Amino acid sequence: MAKMPPHNLKFYGHLVACLLPLLFIVSCSHKPKYEKITINNLAPRRDVNGQIIDSHGGCLQLFNGIYYLYGSRLGTNRVDTVWNVPFSVYTSPNLRDWTDRGNLLKNAPKGVYYRPYVVFNAKTKKYVLWYNWYEKLWTGAAGVAVSDSPTGPFVIVNRHAHLSGSSPGDGTLFVDNDGAGYYVYSDIANDYALRIERLTPDFTDSSGQASSFIAYGVEAPLMFRRHNVYYILAGTLCAACPQGAEVAVEMSSSPFGPYEFAGEINHQSGHDTVQASSDETFESGGERTNGANGLSAYVRPTKKHPFIRGQQTWIAQIPMVNGNSLYIWMADGWFSARDGMRGHDSQYWGAPLQFNPDGTIQPLKVSFQWAIVREKD
């Protein structure tokens, strides 16, 4: 075998010396980077300025890589029914660092209004807000506002959505995979019946296509889809729910049903377990220390009442890098603040829902602290 000339050895030596740093950079650039986001239900959530987040009865959405938390800003109120409270919006890049973006609605109505829900309309490129309001108790209505930005200001375009129910109560929005919008709500005038209506293409009104009554005597309904199954979760009637509310589950293969009752997930035998189920996409904590509201803020060890003292407000879908999503059950702990200020009432973000092979949802478990572990974008 012929020997390599000395000048060639010198050349290749310089070449390797130059390429090694590049190889190191390339190898590092392909190394996955993970982040751990801890969700803590023991202490009040605070914004980047240290203020307790005041956003209740709304939703958590992800738009263009940013999380938006919508709700009512209850402030120093200490009573059940509050009048003329503004809607708030907070943003975060990571579910940990929250910035208060101010009030949401520009020309707010007069009266009692609450439960703001925002979705994006892919056709109009508008963000659409629906909310409940009572100009006079208890003649309910649903109002609609739109904005070019998820932080607003939102401008009211429809003060009385033309729903089939003459007195709509609690309601939430749902956007299907095909871009169709739906509003699921309780019809007060018909014994708080659970009903779904398809929205117009711009999401600013009902199309007039409505489901039959699915259940009766419900509040705080919400709707989501997982694979090819549609879920509606609804709570029982309760006055401000300081004791929490049960959660009934309805399942269907079509947004309009028929739906089948699939059990209750917030009504189980008493225990004080804090370890949530875990899998490769999240891990749960087992801390048992008392937080701002104490363990009793969430645990009710009795067979006669809801297990978690909260009224549901939303199912947040957190996308993971494997294409799946985590489904986070969110609930408001009404009258849970020790200082009595409604703006300081806690909000419970449960560990991801666990589903059985047949699609049914396993009973809720108390998760005082848990974490999402995922690959960074």
Image (cartoon, rainbow, N blue to C red):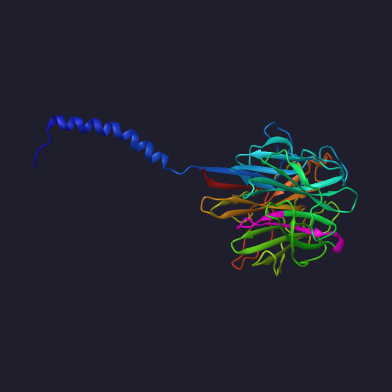
Residue 355 lies, with reference to residue 20, above or below; the image says below
Quadrant housing residue 174: bottom right
Task: Magenta stretch: give its range.
Answer: 173-190
Could you tell me if residue 288 is visible in this image? no
Residue 237 lies, with reference to residue 374, above or below; the image says below
Residue 62 position in % (x across, y down): 62, 46
Residue beneath the point at 61% across and 68% down: 358
Q: Quadrant of the N terminus?
A: top left
Say left or right for 164 vs 176. right
How many discs appear? 0
Quadrant housing residue 12: top left
Residue 337 position in % (x across, y down): 80, 42
> In the rendered structure, does residue 257 fall within the stretch colored magenta?
no
Residue 118 lies, with reference to residue 17, above or below; the image says below
Residue 133 position in % (x across, y down): 83, 49
Say left or right for 99 vs 279. right
Residue 87 lies, with reference to residue 209, above or below; the image says above
Residue 232 position in % (x across, y down): 71, 61
Could you tell me if residue 105 is visible in this image? yes
Farthest left residue? 2
Q: Compare residues 121 and 71 and report the one nearer the observer.
A: 121
Q: Compare residues 28 and 58 and report the one nearer the observer.
A: 58
